Image (cartoon, rainbow, N blue to C red):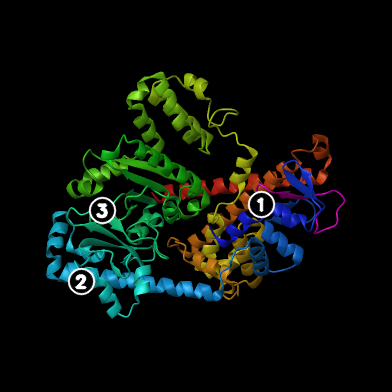
Amino acid sequence: MSVIDDIKGQLDIVAIVGERVPLTKAGRNFKASCPFHTERTPSFYVFPERGTWRCFGACATGGDLFSFLQRAENITFAEALRRLADRAGVTLPTPRVAAQEEQTHRVLFDLNQEAADYFHRILAYSPAGEQTLRYLASRGISRESITRFQLGLSPKGWEILKNHLRDRGYGEVDILQAGLLVSREEGGTYDRFRERLMFPIRDAKGRHIGFGARSLDDSLPKYMNSPQSPVFDKSGVLYALDAAQEEIRASGQAVIVEGYMDALQAHQSGFTNVVAAMGTSLTERQVGLLKGLAIQFLLALDPDAAGEAATRRSLEGAWNIFQRVGVAAAGVGVLHPKDELPDLRIISLPSGKDPDELIRQEPEEWLRRVAAATPILDYLFSWEASRPEAATPAGKQAIVERLFPLISALKNPFEQSRNFHRLAEALGVPERDLEAAIGRPGARGSRGGRTRTPQATASALQAPEGDTLEEHLLALVLRWPDLLPTALETVDLCSDHFQRPENVEAWRVLSEHGSSEALFDVSDPTLQAHSQRLLGLPLPSLTPEERRRAILETARRLDERYIKRLNEEAIEAVARLPQEIVSSDAAFVAATTERSHRLKELHEQGRWGRWRKEALEKERK
């Protein structure tokens, strides 16, 4: 959780606003006369479930508790951040602390790099590595791959690596923090990795952050990883992403396997869009690493695990993660010619073969199975229907109870209908019987349907942590500063189009100064760190014209989302008012009509853009 999220979690926007404005209850919300202009009829609303406020009168603006305090007190974002952090009891990073953290990270990157170099020299150039080299050769791993991925061998002794790193000038505290040492209960430390095949783990920028290690005998555990450190968290890393990201971006397809050897063999055989989750169930952070690179995601399923309840839960978890992250809706459509939801599929492998073996022995069969990968819901339908319990009415009901929520969560009603039909087909029951048992997806009152409680609706409307659409636009401007004039002059964007406070402030600075360098000259360390993160976001290689189209399309989608949000807030604000009052409010009706026309126009622009792309593709073919 970011500092800003932490502050929002500790503070109540109603209390913050209520100290300056006399609020009255209006259903689930609160209203008052706007504090920023004179009016007779209250048009200022606070939405506690969203954590936002909006004026529907002359101001026609809104935001969160940060923007309210900025406007009410006429202060900067940095000052509002400090005041609210003090009130919430949240400690803000100071420039000195931020610099110390950056220095710590550099030391740990260097330490892991030095250890990787040392392990690799033992494997490749010393007699101690000969047996391990023979093992790798028996697994079909070439010397070129050993060098490319810097595979290594940890030495046999208990303090050999520690002494080597100390001789190189590193302190024992830093070596311990990097996870290369283990503390003894009685005092002292010893090497964590001994007599193991070492897989250096790098982040997307190619920096060494940790290690995977495989035992070369019967010692347990068979595989072990570096412990969590300031630069390494297994749940937020994908092995070989640094080597795979270029091909993933070019093809729009990412293949996710389980182990190091699977990924190594794939890259060695020319399948360079493969990454490994390192034996863990796929996590939201790992998906986040891929969300700007691909539109199709393929999971290679371990055939020996098929049928296990844990595997089913893992697949359902992966599906839910992709639904939450919303890759395509958050910006992938700008990067790829397709404009569709993320496509998650399952690669079925032959019994008894993992990707490593299949690629090594039958590369053509691997390609065939990748091409024939099954959409995950179709896979789950077939899998569940093949279970013995599917033969009984009670078993069918249990299967439907498990799978129906996955269908109902789909945003596209046509996809809902297709998958509802597929489920009925897989279970061998008439669709009308399935509807009678569980209802239809999206139908009011159906179990697991799309009818939402007010709390769920509000939650769904809130910006996700790290709003990807906003940050994609900011990243484009930071990566290619010449795009800023296009964004400022051609696109009618304002800070209200942004929802995350740090993005609102970043856009304000960019708009005010007309220069991307201004973001790195601000004194606020939180905004500086955020700007550095934006600058490091992965973007594809684009021509100048493609960059211009990307900024225009991203801005169009931000504008469309902004207008939808205005409509939703307006509907929520007047939901409790008599219809005759709403109908008689000429300003409200005019504003609503204008927004409806604007939304239609934006939809037409989006469709025209897609048609134009398809036409150009046909012309090229």
Residue 42 % position (x, y) = 82, 49
Task: Give the dominant element type of the magenta stretch: helix, strand or loop.
Answer: loop
Front residue of this view, candidates 243 and 492 = 243
The amino acid at mark 2 is: Arg
> In the displayed structure, does residue 255 sit left or right of residue 498?
left
Residue 255 % position (x, y) = 34, 49
Task: Point out the frontmost of discs 3 and 2.
Answer: 3
In the orientation shown, which residue stands out farthest toward the right? 40
Residue 376 image-quadrant placement: top left
The amino acid at mark 1 is: Gly
Q: Earlier in the sequence, mark 1 or mark 3?
A: 1
Residue 91 % position (x, y) = 58, 66
Residue 51 numbered mark, or none: 1
What residue is shown at x 19% (from left), y 45% (from top)?
A: 362
Residue 121 numbered mark, or none: 2
Residue 221 numbered mark, or none: 3
Task: Point out the frontmost of discs 1 and 3.
Answer: 3
